[in-house]
């Protein structure tokens, strides 16, 4: 065949080849995990004097996790995948500043780096379990007896919606204490922050690398006691250092240095704040207040707040009862 017929046939073959290539799945990326560091060098900087008593009083405070600054250098052994791959560095410091990450000894091109903050929290559990089989445990407040129902979690936007025995029910809308029980941790959640690197390498291999980064949440304070001699001519000075780790990452077998001084920091040397996922626990057991004639909110200002769109929060999973206005 010649002329237009040949050109048409070539066009059809080209389109068919393109469609076939588009239908083929992309090559799966190999994921390599470095579970922990073999050695760590930590330098903690302190710009201003720190009160030791204040550090102990603020333990567990989210504010304390953003204080202090440390330079952490880790020695790790990693398996570099051939081609396109992902290397995950687990058990890094909670307050890692991703923009400060420097890695030495990695024979691969880094195309992307991220801090994975999809942490194991109640909100994260529910959000990641949509479509999964769960158990709802309802407790009778008078007898303490528990009733367990098996269902499917259908939604988790403004609260949890369950499908139980063909019905859709909202969690904690029965007027009784309820909770969800999951049989496993959803894939993708972790109890520790993870640093992920997307890499491109010509060949696979095992290598020792140096991973360095800045992190917040580490502090130190110094206290001193002076004891004069009996004759009052000399003075014995004793001092000790108090170290504070506000994160969940454990630092053991480290070479530690403490520096009193202020570093010149740019805006990108601030840690990324993970998004907090809230889980609403309040629910009116009688539908909405507009569907119950003659009833209103208690005279506590909550009604005005709701009309204005303000936040309303309850400390308990059981909402306050509706009362008829006098």
Image: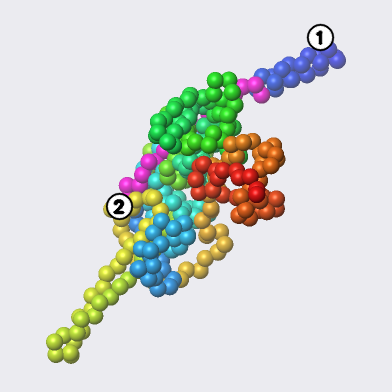
> Would you say the residues marked 2 and 1 are in contact, meaning their CB atoms lie under 8 Å apart?
no
Q: Residue at x 52, y 65 (%)?
A: 265
Out of 111 and 125, give the one closest to the viewer: 125
Out of 99 and 210, give the one closest to the viewer: 99
25 within the magenta span: yes
250 within the magenta span: no
Q: Residue furthest right?
A: 4
Residue that numbered label 1 is attached to: 1
Q: Residue furthest front?
A: 326
Image: 106 above or below 155: below
Residue that numbered label 2 is attached to: 252
Using residue 324 as the reference point, say whether residue 209 is left or right of it. Answer: left
Instruction: Specify start and end residues of the magenta stretch as a single range.
Output: 22-39
Q: Is residue 148 visible?
A: yes
Give the crowd class for mark 2: few <14, some 14-19, many >=20 residues within 10 Å.
few
Q: Residue at x 27, y 69 (%)?
A: 240
User: Which quarter of the image is occupied by the N terminus?
Assistant: top right
Q: Residue furthest top?
A: 1
The span from disc 2 to disc 1 (Cα, nearest Å) is 77 Å
Residue 73: x, y in percent?
Answer: 39, 55
Residue 143: x, y in percent?
Answer: 40, 33
């Amino acid at each position: 065949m010649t002329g237009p017929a040949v050109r048409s046939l070539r066009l059809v073959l080209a389109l068919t080849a393109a469609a076939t290539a588009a239908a083929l799945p992309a090559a799966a990326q190999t994921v390599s995990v470095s579970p922990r560091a073999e050695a760590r060098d930590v330098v903690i900087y302190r710009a201003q004097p720190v009160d030791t008593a204040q550090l102990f009083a603020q333990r567990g405070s989210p504010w304390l996790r953003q204080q202090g600054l440390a330079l952490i250098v880790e020695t790790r052994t990693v398996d570099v995948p051939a081609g396109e791959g992902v290397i995950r560095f687990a058990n890094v410091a909670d307050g890692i500043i991703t923009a400060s990450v420097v890695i030495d000894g990695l024979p691969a091109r880094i195309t992307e780096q991220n801090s994975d903050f999809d942490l194991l929290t109640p909100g994260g559990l529910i959000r990641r379990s949509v479509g999964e089989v769960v158990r709802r445990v309802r407790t009778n407040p008078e007898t303490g007896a528990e009733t367990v129902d098996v269902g499917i979690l259908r939604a988790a936007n403004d609260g949890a919606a369950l499908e139980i025995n063909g019905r859709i029910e909202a969690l904690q809308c029965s007027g009784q204490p309820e909770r969800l029980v999951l049989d496993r941790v959803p894939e993708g959640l972790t109890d520790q922050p993870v640093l992920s690197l997307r890499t491109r390498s010509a060949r696979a291999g095992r290598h020792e690398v140096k991973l360095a980064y800045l992190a917040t949440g580490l502090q130190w304070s110094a206290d001193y006691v002076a004891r004069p001699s009996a004759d009052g001519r000399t003075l014995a000075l004793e001092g000790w250092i108090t170290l504070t780790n506000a994160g969940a990452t454990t630092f053991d077998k480290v070479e530690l240095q403490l520096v009193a001084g202020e570093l010149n920091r740019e805006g990108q040397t601030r840690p990324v704040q993970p998004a907090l996922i809230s889980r609403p626990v309040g629910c009116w057991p009688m539908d909405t207040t507009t569907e119950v004639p003659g009833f209103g909110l208690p005279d506590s200002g909550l009604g005005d707040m709701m009309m204005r769109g303000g936040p309303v929060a309850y400390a308990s999973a059981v909402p306050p009862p509706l009362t008829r206005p006098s």
